[in-house]
Amino acid sequence: MPTYTVTNSNFYISYKQQKKIAEGITKVHNIVTGANTYFAQVIFNKTKKNNHFMGGKIVKEPSLFLLGQIRSGRAKEIKDKLISDLKDVLVKNSNLDETQVWVYINDLPPSQMIEYGAVLPESGKEKEWFSNLSPKLRKKLSALEK
């Protein structure tokens, strides 16, 4: 956790842009929430032509959507900064206007999530959770840490 799904509609995002967006999302999440970078995953999707509607009408202009599923328990101020900084990452790396970028955050109770074979910890209890993982998995996750 978190899992961020980036969906682009009616325009192309290059691999280089995807990499910069993924790095930016990971960095923002780490800095704003304090969560380790190895928790953050970013998945990219693209809508097919004529598969995006608004108000029942086909959308032709470019749009970029970010849906972030994060652990609950964080203060409103943290989530406000998170969505604002995530929007900035998307605008900067997509070359879209901010009116074409949408950011949504969903809070999920950590007790309802499993990653790496273990139920996720409450925010702030990552070190204890990490210490209970196998040495092999700790080594793998440490290699992902920036």
Image (cartoon, rainbow, N blue to C red):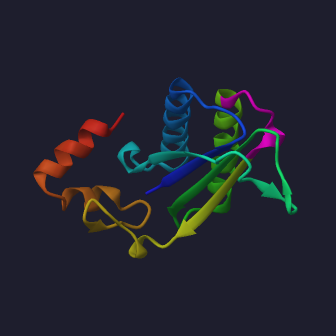
Q: Residue furthest top?
A: 16
In this image, 9 relative to 145: left or right? right
Q: Residue furthest front?
A: 50
Which picture quadrant has residue 64? top right
The quarter of the image holding the N terminus is: bottom left
**Does 13 appear above or below 80?**
above
Q: Position of residue 39 (x, y in %)?
A: 39, 51
> Count the marks: how many?
0
**Does 26 appear above or below 55?**
above
Q: Position of residue 79 (x, y in %)?
A: 64, 56
Q: Nearer the viewer, residue 133 or 9?
A: 9
Q: Position of residue 95 (x, y in %)?
A: 72, 27
Q: Position of residue 2 (x, y in %)?
A: 47, 55
The residue drawn where x is 27% and y is 67% is 118
**Does 1 appear above or below 38?**
below
Tell me, yes or no, whether the highlighted magenta stretch contains residue 105.
no
The residue drawn where x is 50% and y is 37% is 22
Which picture quadrant has residue 113? bottom left
The quarter of the image holding the C terminus is: top left
Q: Which region shows up in magenta?
A: 94-101
The residue drawn where x is 26% and y is 45% is 141
Q: Nearer the viewer, residue 55 or 78?
A: 55
The residue drawn where x is 86% and y is 63% is 56
Q: Nearer the viewer, residue 59 or 137?
A: 59
